Amino acid sequence: MALKKHHKWMIGSFSSLVIIFMIVSSILFYSIYVKQEYNYNSLNDKIAELQADTQTKINILTGNIMQTTESLSLTQENLQQTQLDLESNQQELDLLKASAGEDFSGIIEEAIKGVVTIQTNSAQGTGFIISSEGYVITNAHVLADDQGHLATGIRIITSDQTPVGAEFIGYDGELDVALLKVEGDYHQLELGNSDDTQIGEKVIAIGNPLGLQFSVTEGIISAKERPGANGISAYFQTDAALNPGNSGGPLINKQGKIIGINNFKISTGENLGFALESNYLKNIINQISQEQLNQTLIN
C-alpha cells in the first residue's frame, strides 16, 4: 500500500530531526571533549608551573641553607680565633704585669702564711705547705745530718711562730726533695706552671737565711733549664739572694704562685741562686705521695 503524502512528510521530518539531533549531539559531545581537553591541558600546565615554582623555591631554600651553614662555620671559626686572641692578650697582660714595676707587698702577706721554718738537731731550713691538710715540701738535704742520714728532732715553726712536730713521709735524693706532714689546717700555696715563666720575669724568694725567719728577697729569672749537680736541666737561675737557711723555700712569681723550690747557690759567684722548676717539683712530689700514701697530692 502506498504511503500517503502526509505520511511521507512526517517520516521525512522525523528523519531530519534524527539527523539534526545526531549532528547537534556530535557538536555537543565534541565541544565537551574539546573543553575537557583544554581543561586537562590547562591543569597540566598549572601543575608543571607549580612544580617548576616549587623546585625553584626548593633550590633557593637549599642555597640559603648552604649559605647559612657556611656562615655558621665562619662564625664558629671567628669565635675560636677571638678566643685564641683573648687568651693571647691575657698572656701578654700577665707578662706585662710580671715585668711591671709593682711591688710584691700584697702577695707576700698571703704567701708567708704558707711558709714554714724547719729545724732539726743539726740544721735549719725552709719549707712550704702545698695542701690544706698540712703536707710540707722542703729540700731533702735540710733533713740530713752530717753523715747524710735523716736528722732527728724535726720541728716546724709556722708563720705565726707556733712550733709543731712533723712526720717524715718520703724523699727523692736525686732532685733533693722531701715531703713532711704536720697536723692541723693550714694556708696552702699553689704551684704555677714553670713552662710559662719568662726570662727576666720578677720573682721573690721567701726563707730563713742565717736564721732570720721569713725573710724576703727579690730578683728576676736569669735563665731557665740550668743543669744541677745531678746533671738534670731542671733549674731556674735567679739573682734573688739565697743564703744558708733559704733552702727549701718557695720561689714565687707576680701572680703569687710557686714556680720553683730554692735549692742551692754558687758560693764563688754573686747572685747565682738556683731553684728546681715547679713542674719537676710537682711530678716528684706526686711520685713520693703515690709510693708512700697511695694518693696524688698536687693536681
Image: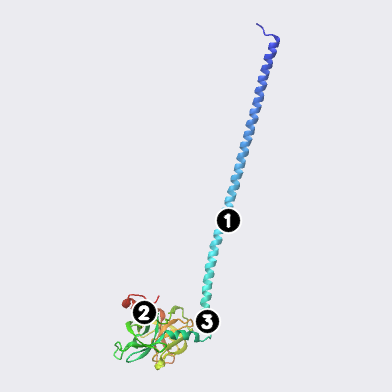
Label 1: few (<14), some or many (≥20) within 10 Å?
A: few
Q: Secondary structure at mark 2?
A: helix
Q: Residue at x 67, y 17 (%)?
A: 14
Three-letter amino acid code at the position of disc 2? Ile
At 67% from the left and 21% from the top, the residue drawn is 20
Between tags 1 and 2, which lies in front? 2
Residue beneath label 2, please? 285
Among numbered discs 2 and 3, the one appearing first in the sequence: 3
**Of callouts 1 and 2, the N-terminal one:** 1
The one nearer the camera, 72 or 183, is: 183
Q: Amino acid at mark 3?
A: Lys
Q: Check disc 3 and report the residue beneath it.
A: 97
Q: Which mark is residue 47?
A: none
Residue farthest along the top direction in this orientation? 1
> Is residue 22 shown left or right of residue 283?
right
Residue 277, by quadrant, is bottom left
What separation in Å lies between label 2 and label 3 (alpha carbons)? 30 Å
The disc labelled 1 sits on which kind of residue?
A: Asn
Q: Nearer the viewer, residue 79 or 117?
A: 117
